[in-house]
Amino acid sequence: MSLQEIKEQAFNLSPNERLALVNFIVESLQAELSLQTNQTQTEQALSPLPAPTINAIFVIPSISPSNE
């Protein structure tokens, strides 16, 4: 079915049916946006941490037993 045919059928709907169709479209778009947002947040949470920089590397001195 082409977009033109869908438009023609939509114009043949009653006002209540048009409102129901618009409501369905809006709810579908909201659900899709929510799904995409959740997917993006999940991808960001699972993405690897950035490589450490020289400023982020700390050297911990080793503690040797003293020879007394």
Image: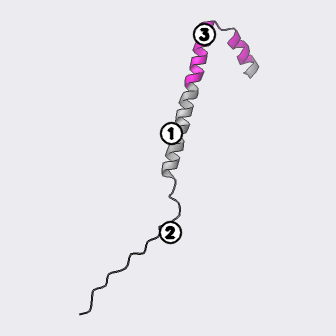
Q: Which residue is drawn at 50% across and 68% down?
A: 55
* Residue 32 picture location, percent across and down: 56, 32
Outermost residue, top side: 14
Q: Compute the Cα span from label 1 to label 3.
A: 31 Å
Nearest-to-viewer mark from 1 and 3: 1
Residue type, label 2 = Asn
Q: Name the residue under label 1.
A: 38
The residue that appears at 57% across and 14% down in the rendered structure is 20
Badge 1 or badge 3: first in the primary sequence: 3
In this figure, which residue is indicated by the disc labeled 2? 55
Nearer to us: label 1 or label 2: 2
Q: Which amino acid does the dot numbered 3 rest on?
A: Glu
Badge 2: few (under 14), some or many (20 or more) residues near its Cα, within 10 Å?
A: few
Residue 1 within the magenta-colored segment of the rendering:
no
| Numbered range of the magenta stretch | 5-27
The residue located at (47%, 70%) in the rendering is 57
Label 1 with label 3: CB-CB less than 8 Å: no
- Residue 27: assigned label: none
Comparing marks 3 and 2, which lies closer to the viewer? 2
Distance between the alpha carbons at the discs numbered 3 and 2: 63 Å
Q: In this picture, is 12 found above or below 26?
A: above
Near-viewer residue (1 or 61): 61
